[in-house]
Structures are given as C-alpha cells and as structure tokens.
Image: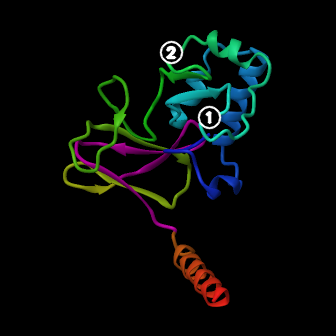
Amino acid sequence: MTANGTGDARVLVPTPDRGAQRRVGAAVDGLRDRTTNRVGALLGPLGFRFIAVPETPGPDQRPVRIAPDGVLGSLADQLDLVRLETRDGMTLYEVEPWRPVRAVEPAAGGAPVPARPDAENPAGRATLAVPSSPAWRAEGGTPSAALDRVRIDGWANGYRLPTAGPVSFSYANQWLRWPAVALQVGVIVGAVVLWR
C-alpha cells in the first residue's frame, strides 16, 4: 500500500489500528480465500484507486514479492475491478467504487466527488477517509463555518455540509510536530559537526 507514490521510511513505522488496517486485512484475506467477489467495495471507501501486482522485477532490479497463490485469479474474478492494459510484468486493476480520500457525497445522490477547498462543493456529507479523530476539523459551506463531525463506516471522519460551498480539512493536534522538527534539525546539525 502506498499513498501518492512509492512511499518512504514513514511506511515502515506501524500506525495504531483504528479500523482502516482491519478493512485492508479483510480485503486481502477475502482475495486469498476467495470469499469475496467485491473487494473494490472494501477498498474503494479507503481511497484505493488502483491495485497493482508486480510479477517481475522493475527497472531497478529489486526483488519482487510474488503475490500469494490464487490472488491473481481471485482479482480476475472481482466484479468491481477493471483490468487495465499495462506492460508485461505488471497486472493493474482500477477500483470501480473508488472514493477520493477527501470527498463530498451529494445530498441529492450520485457518486462522491473530490472535496475542493477553492470551489463550490454540493451540499451533503464531507468525508475524510482517515482514522476517526476529534483532532480533524472541517470547514465549509457558504458562509464558511465549522462542520459537525460524525463517525462514518465505523472508522472514518464525516462532516455534515448543510450548504454548498468550499470544504477544507485541518488537523488541530500538532503539538508534537515542532519538537520533532527541532529534534531532526539537531540530529542533522550534530551529524554534520561530527562528520567534519
């Protein structure tokens, strides 16, 4: 799993399980055991847009972890995944019920749309597909105001958006960030001083 790229050292640190990891685990177990034919319905609300299964090493020739037996066949049997054309050595599927991580579900019905902080969003429910926490805040509507938070799907953040308008999300609990940045700078400066 990656978010917006190949990932970095942050993906090596396990995060507390607040529901999303269990859903991903259930989806992988369902694929491996062939107990579901709608794995996209499990992964789409988490923001998964594509499922890529490498079968051969890439250009950098790093070893590839082969998918467990039966997973490729099970992916081919899914009703809510669309196989995309790729080069040899990679199987790629698009998740049909994909929802953006930051989305607005229109009150009038229809598919969720990406939440835009600089454009008109329809009235309905703004969703943020990250583990539910009261530290997450949302503002939106016209005029802009703090939105009421609700927990959705048992794990994610949702906000009532009573009127159409821009929607923005922020995380209010960042008291640890600045000491962590100061520590990083201190380590780098110390490493440079010791290296000389």
115 vs 21, left or right, is left
34 vs 60, left or right, is right
- Residue positioned 70% across, 49% down in the render: 17
Q: Per the image, is 18 magenta?
A: no
**Where residue 18 appears, x then y in whole percent?**
66, 48
**Where residue 96 appears, x then y in whole percent?**
47, 20
Q: Earlier in the sequence, mark 2 or mark 1?
A: 1
15 vs 84, left or right, is right
Q: Which of 34 and 69 is in front in this view?
A: 69
Residue type, label 1: Gly
The scheme the figure's colours follow is: rainbow
- Residue 126's place in the image compared with 136, above or below, is above
**Where residue 49 appears, x then y in whole percent?**
49, 30
Query: Residue tagged by mark 2?
Result: 82
- Residue positioned 23% across, 50% down in the render: 118
Q: Nearer the viewer, mark 2 or mark 1?
A: 1
- Residue positioned 52% across, 78% down in the render: 178
Q: In which quarter of the image is residue 10?
A: bottom right
Query: Residue tagged by mark 1?
Result: 58
Q: Give the range drawn in magenta.
A: 147-173
**Where residue 32 appears, x then y in whole percent?**
76, 21
Point out which mark residue 27 bears. none
Q: Per the image, is 150 magenta?
A: yes
